[in-house]
Image: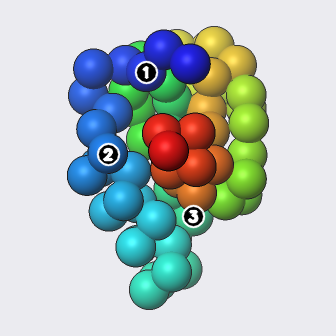
Amino acid sequence: MKLHPTITRRRVEHAVERRMLSLDNPGLCIACGEEADGCEPDAREYECQSCGEAAVYGADELLMEMG
């Protein structure tokens, strides 16, 4: 899986922490790097509201993909 350069392990970990400690459900678009709100933790290939690509992944899913 090719990730946008702005999607770092630390950024994904921070998104997972926010999901666990608040009402946030962040996802990240691997195509454009934008954050998406209201994503299920295991979301895969949701449509990005910024770029239109089917490339939004839930934070937890991305963390698992990163290994």
Left or right side of 39 for 8 = left
Can you tell which mark lies on residue 3?
1
Reading the image, the residue beneath label 2 is: 9
Residue 30 located left or right of residue 4: right
Quarter that holds the N terminus:
top right
Q: Residue 66: image x %, image y %?
A: 48, 39
Instruction: Name above or below for residue 23 compared with residue 33.
Output: below
Give the farthest residue toward the bottom.
21
The disc, 1 or 2, on the residue closer to the chain's N-terminal end is 1
- Please name the residue that numbered disc 3 is placed on: 25
Q: Residues within 10 Å of mark 2 (few under 14, many from 20)?
A: few
Tell me where residue 25 sits by quadrant: bottom right
Residue 11 visible in the shown view:
yes
Q: Element type at marker 3? A: loop
Residue 23: x and y in percent read 54, 80
Horizontal and vertical percent position of residue 54: 70, 19
Earlier in the chain: of badge 3 and badge 2, it is: 2
